[in-house]
Image (spheres, rainbow, N blue to C red):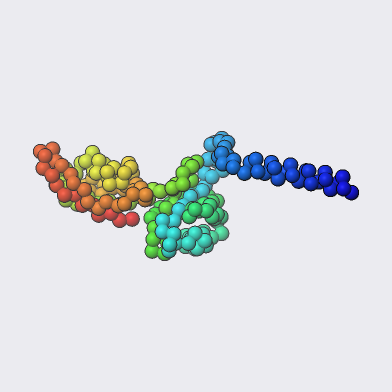
Amino acid sequence: MGSSYMQRSSHLGDIIGKGILYEDDDAPIKLMDQDNTLLVNEFSLSLIGKILNPKIQNVDKILQKMPSQWGMEDRITANDLGNGKVLLNFSSEDDLNSVLRQFPFHFNFCMFVLVRWKPIVHDDYPWIIPFKVQVIGIPLHLWTDKNLRNIGARLGHFHVDTLEVSEGRMLVDVDTRRPLKFSRKVEAKDGMRLPLRSNMRC
């Protein structure tokens, strides 16, 4: 009896001792990459989204209400990814594109981001929202494709998706991590500086 108890005590001591040895092991756990082709195929009909105002937006309510609002409650499966992010899985490309065409996306009077899923690992992802921008304050003869694209790139921090030169309008991808800018200074070829305003709407 005593011998058995001592053996168990010795074994327990070994386990406790090993636990102490690894207690301070803070080295990151390395994750292995998966073949992106398999991932892209698996999530080819998925959208990933993120709330921008967690104080008044609730992920659970978005997952409950948005599929119904789009009339697709029976054709979308939704998952809470944590950290204010959601994953929406569609059954067809037509349904997915139908939802994307309804941008920008609002819930509880605030915007949220919703884009096609990509194999991106970043705490802030996704962060891009498209904005329709109309340029105000520059002479008509300066409304050229190149000038408007340069303006759009500076306003949106990224490339310009679509452009209507005759109307001075464009669709710009805006980085939600940076503050919106509604005015910038521009300089004409003769050195004349002009105040530029942009009418940005979703």
In the image, farthest residue toward the front: 2
Q: Position of 15 compared to 41: left or right?
A: right
Determine if residue 68 is in view.
no
Residue appearing at x 48%, y 45% in the figure: 117
Q: Nearer the viewer, residue 123 or 189?
A: 123
Q: Position of 78 compared to 3: left or right?
A: left
Q: Quadrant of residue 27?
A: top right
Determine if residue 60 is in view.
yes
Q: Residue 42's x, y, as percent?
A: 56, 43
Residue appearing at x 87%, y 45% in the figure: 3
Q: Nearer the viewer, residue 31 or 143?
A: 31
Residue appearing at x 27%, y 43% in the figure: 154
Q: Which quadrant: the C terminus?
A: bottom left
Q: Residue 48's x, y, as percent?
A: 48, 50
Q: How many marks?
A: 0
Residue appearing at x 39%, y 61% in the figure: 110
Q: Nearer the viewer, residue 114 or 123?
A: 123
Q: Residue 165's x, y, as percent?
A: 23, 45
Q: Residue 180's x, y, as percent?
A: 30, 52
